[in-house]
Image (spheres, rainbow, N blue to C red):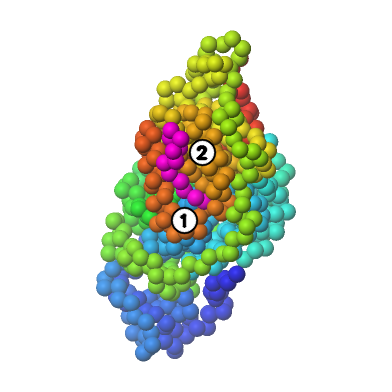
Amino acid sequence: MTQTSFPSWPDVAADLIATAAGRAPADTVIRGGKWVNVHSREVLDGHDIAITAGRIACVVPDATYCTGPDTQVIEANGRYMIPGLCDAHMHIESGMLTPAEFARAVTPHGTTSMFTDPHEIANVLGLAGVRMMHDEALMQPVNIFTQMPSCAPSAPGLETTGHEITPDDVAEAMTWPGIIGLGEMMNFPGVAAADPKMLAEIAATQAAGKTVGGHYASPDLGPAFAAYVAGGPADDHEGTGEADAIARVRQGMRAMMRLGSAWYDVEKQITAITEKGLDPRNFILCTDDCHSGTLVNDGHMNRVLRHAIACGCDPLVALQMATINTATHFGLEREIGSLAPGRRADVILTSDLVTLPIELVIARGRIVAENGVSLAEFPHYDWPDTARNTVHLGHALTPDDFEIKAPDGANTARANIIGVVENQAPTKALKADLPVRDGLVDGTGDICQIALVERHRATGGVTNAFVSGFGYQGRMAMASTVAHDSHHMIVVGTDRAQMALAANRLAEVGGGITIFRDGQELALVELPIAGLMSDSPASDVAQAAERMMQAMRDCGCSLNNAYMQHSLLALVVIPELRISDKGLVDVRSFEPIPVLES
């Protein structure tokens, strides 16, 4: 493995001082731009940025005095010079890409720093998988900081993962060079109940002087929330409304407002700043989950920034929430997040602060993208066979594996049903009377079947239930080995034979997403690494993903970014109903409930 070498400030401090003083020429000078200063929240016209050893030596009205014959001069031509954008909370695996290909995809959009929680691969491969992600992250020409996953499983006792993360794992990871803190603490009931394992992980992180990520996915802002905050999480991205954001910052947390492929939580929370007038320093923008299609077609943090501005936020305030606020939160204010001396020279040139065209991207002092085209090398990790062979079903599945038997003699059956909510992570707990045919309960109308197929230990286990909201029609099924967070296999369908075909197909290709209709495969996204990621270019994966989403539409689904909803149906830490290998789970009470009521 070859890691990108980047000098620390002490290694180059003398060189930076020499350049700033005019005793030595800069390596690069960006000349004649508008300096967007996120420390003072102002725009200063007619400034130059002098860069030495990949860091900013000075920002001055005229850097001619430190420009030598070999200095690279980049003409800003009056454009705005803004800091490289930071994504404060995200999961690379959600892009269906490895860290290298994710970085290649987002760098042209101006993202130069990412704070990633690889808890998806942790559930499949454990600490070894986290190390693989961490190591590839360090090889990149942009900044990818890794948070050590905290919760695998996310809800102990309610799901079985491929591997578990322990406090000893967390303590070990805190010694790795690229670990910035603890990933989102999803087991919020455990923290509120002072669970010793959760507190040991938090203590190991705080002992290392690093940041504890939060995840409080409950509307209860009473004693349970107070207990969670007392447990140590420093931020939270699960808020969906203004009251959530306000409650978090009042208690000393950072409110992370997300705009992902399917999560539209910025608009309802940013009013805490734009209407209530709260201090924006403790508000941060992030994506959480973006699939490859969004990255290729719509953007990344530039998309979030534009959206925040469109929601009425002052452009400079929005920029602070995507740069310096994030850097400060993770203790990196002297490294990234602003255009100031000593910081890494992560710079974007743009001609407009509102529409934010990303015209030139500089990372660590080097041009890495221009006008939407990546110009840097993004090295790949040598992923071993253990990471590429992770789908183990135990036996070939048949339609019988997906049967839900009715009570003896029943003509209908009362069922608990997972209700999908468009553009939100939470689901609804629904009930309906379903028809019985030949002793089996069937879906009707918008209600179809969902199954979770165990794929880590080849147990052959299949959990069956019902889901509504996708609008599927005809004889079809969709299967995915991306099933947050346990990452078994989720199969949703209207026909048991199609469900078996789809599940067996993913076992054959080593993981991914497939859709079958009337015995024919309509689309396939191959994700051979942990059943979660591809090391192909983002454009290729995005094309396959678009075919998959078109196939969903062809089968009757009209939900926005319905794939993200599909992939989260096993996430047993977000209310109200989810499915796991242990059965149907009511996340309001964290208790299993029957699929059919007696």
Furthest residue in direction front, as rendered: 519
Q: Is residue 11 left or right of residue 342?
A: right
List the residue tagged with mark 2.
502
Question: Label 2: few (<14), some or many (≥20) within 10 Å?
Answer: many
Measured as percent of width and height from the top left, residue 35 is found at 34, 69
Give the image location of residue 183, x and y in percent: 59, 51
Helix, strand or loop for disc 2: helix
Q: Nearer the viewer, mark 2 or mark 1?
A: 2
Residue drawn 57% across and 16% down? Answer: 439
Name the image quarter holding the N terminus: bottom right
Q: Amino acid at mark 1?
A: Asp
Give how far apart the Cα atoms at labels 2 and 1 are: 35 Å
Expressed as whole percent of the image width and height from the top left, the position of residue 352 reads: 28, 61
- Which element type, helix, strand or loop, lies under badge 1? strand
Examine the rendered structure and indicate whether residue 2 appears above or below residue 149.
Answer: below
Residue pictured at 34% horizontal, 49% vertical = 307
Q: Is residue 10 magenta?
A: no
Q: Is residue 418 visible?
A: no
Which portion, as a residue range, is magenta?
A: 516-527
Q: Residue 203: percent from the left, percent from the top?
A: 69, 52
Q: Which residue is mark 1?
A: 87
Task: Say what amino acid the circle numbered 2 marks.
Answer: Ala
Q: Overall secondary structure of the magenta stretch?
A: strand
Q: Which quadrant would residue 591 be assigned to in this image? A: top right
